[in-house]
Amino acid sequence: MGIITLLYLILWSILLNHFQNSILAGEVEENFRSIASVLFTQMGLQFSSMLISLITIMLSAGIIASELDTGMIQAIISRPIRRMDYVLGKFVGLCIFIVVTASILFFALLAIGAIFLLETIIFLALPQILLSWLLYLLVPISLICLTIYGSVSLKTVPCGLLMIAIYILGSIGGMVEMIGGLINNAAVSSAGIFLGLVSPFHIIYSTAERILIPATGLAGEMMRGAGGLAGSGRHPSIWMFVYIGFYCLFFVIFAVRKFEKIDII
């Protein structure tokens, strides 16, 4: 996955290099330049977030389930360590690794965009960058909270497949809510909101994207009205993020409680 991440950064650099050369050669119209910059920024952020989410699921799906399957857990639990400490240790360690990995990827994307003078990157303010970075990190962290509960409850492969399905469900919910808003249908919008409550990861990402991409200008407004590359509904309220906090806390607590009830020895 590290090699894939590096290849992604290289390919994105090549793409931006060709785009910049086209601008210098006069092959790109002035009106299209801003829209293309927004598209490139959205593409870079969205696929990087998907990549980090995939890495997160791959690492956390078997973080406990694999040791339960192989029996390695018996050698660990037989030591003077509480089961709660075991689960929380796995959780915190994985969070630290993912935060470092996601941060490197996020700032590498911004650095590459700045090197190639991408309009949506070079005019960013520091508060925009910091807030969008924190929300960018919240996506994999919330995924860890859900997946570690799945790792306690399921075997590695079923847990991984289920987590991927739930993650994709969030993107579907964003598109459904966007379509409901466009056709002014409350029932469709409500269905999208419900899917977003089950899988809030796309809501977190779309908020980070809204903050990072300038709200002013024709290009930003056009792409924002279109819901971005993957679709999104209305801007979430603060209460949605309060819900996400309880969502994460709920699954971590129940992962600990579930693990304490497992008959290991």
Image (spheres, helix red, strand yellow):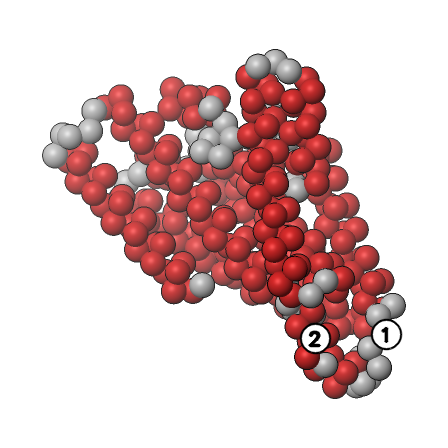
List the single residue furthest toward the left.
25
- For the point 35% across and 50% down, the residue is 111
Q: Which residue is mark 2?
A: 69
Secondary element type, mark 1 = loop
Residue 123, placed above or below residue 130: above
Residue 263's disc number: 1
Residue 116's disc number: none
Whole-percent x, y for residue 195 in the image:
67, 35
Q: Can you say which quadrant of the picture contains the N terminus?
A: bottom left
- For the point 49% across and 48% down, the residue is 49
Q: Residue 71, located in which quarter of the rendered image?
A: bottom right
Horizontal side of 100 relative to 160 (left or right) equals left
Whole-percent x, y for residue 64 in the image:
69, 70
Badge 2 amino acid: Asp
What separation in Å lies between label 1 and label 2 (alpha carbons)?
Answer: 13 Å
Residue 212, placed above or below residue 17: above
**Depth check: 48 or 119 in front?**
48
Residue 123, placed above or below residue 48: above
